[in-house]
Image: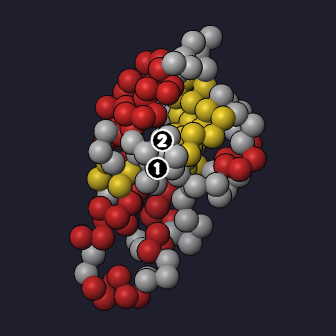
Amino acid sequence: MKKILYLDMDNVLVDFPSAFEHLDDDLKEKYKDNMDDIPNIFSKMKPLVGAIEAYEVLSKQFDTYILSTAPWNNPTAWSDKLLWVQKYLGEYAYKRLIISHNKHLNRGDFLIDDRLKNGVDKFQGEHIYFGQGEFQTWDDVLEYLTSKQG
């Protein structure tokens, strides 16, 4: 039986700041304290370097899901995240998107996330802290997880 792996979207699969170049200055100013509440901001984001390739590799080795949080005050974020997954991950992520503000309610072996919020700090499997310590890049994560598969 494959081990269960969850991956966050924002700043793990998705390059969140890549959307900013598509925003005008008035919009940036209006939402300066809550950039993730900008309508359709999630539709403007590009994949993080190496993320798509890593997801494809990992989806063959693990029972892989995307576990993300969407801003409560931005209803477009929910559909934008689904559309992003369909566009960039296609068949590899078919019906594999979970949106939750309580990530610890999901059971699994690994969770790749760049933060400790939304229940990540209570997740019962192993948290791979993306962008921190030994997990700076997707290459680092792949090397580590390849040794843990099976």
Q: CA distance from mark 1 to mark 2?
A: 6 Å
Q: Is residue 5 above or below residue 83?
A: above
- Which of the colour schemes (rainbow, by chain, secondary structure, one colour) is used? secondary structure
Mark drawn on residue 76 = none
Relative to the observer, which residue lies in front, 115 or 56? Answer: 115
**At which x and y percent is residue 149?**
54, 17
Q: Residues within 10 Å of mark 2 (few under 14, many from 20)?
A: some
Please tell me whether mark 2 sits on a helix, a strand or a loop: loop
Q: Residue at x 57, y 12 (%)?
A: 150
Residue 147: horizontal and vertical position, in percent?
Answer: 51, 18
Relative height, residue 44 to residue 112 (above, below) = below
Q: Secondary structure at mark 1?
A: loop
Q: Is residue 73 visible?
A: yes
x 29%, y 53%: residue: 46
Q: Residue at x 43, y 26 (%)?
A: 143
Residue 135: mark: 2
User: Where, by quadrant of the figure, is residue 118 drawn?
Assistant: bottom right
Image vertical order of residue 25 relative to residue 65, above or below? below
- Look at 35% across and 82% down and name the residue there: 28
Query: How many C-alpha atoms fall within 10 Å of the one at disc 1: few (<14), some, or many (≥20)?
Result: some
Q: Which residue is mark 1?
A: 131
Image coords of residue 83 (percent x, y): 37, 48
In the foreground, 79 or 105: 105
Left or right: where does residue 133 sit relative to residue 89?
A: right
Horizontal and vertical percent position of residue 88 = 31, 41
Q: How many marks?
A: 2
Q: Marks 2 and 1: in contact by CB < 8 Å?
A: yes
Q: Is residue 109 left or right of residue 86?
A: right
Three-letter amino acid code at the position of disc 1: Gly
Residue 137 location, quadrant: top left
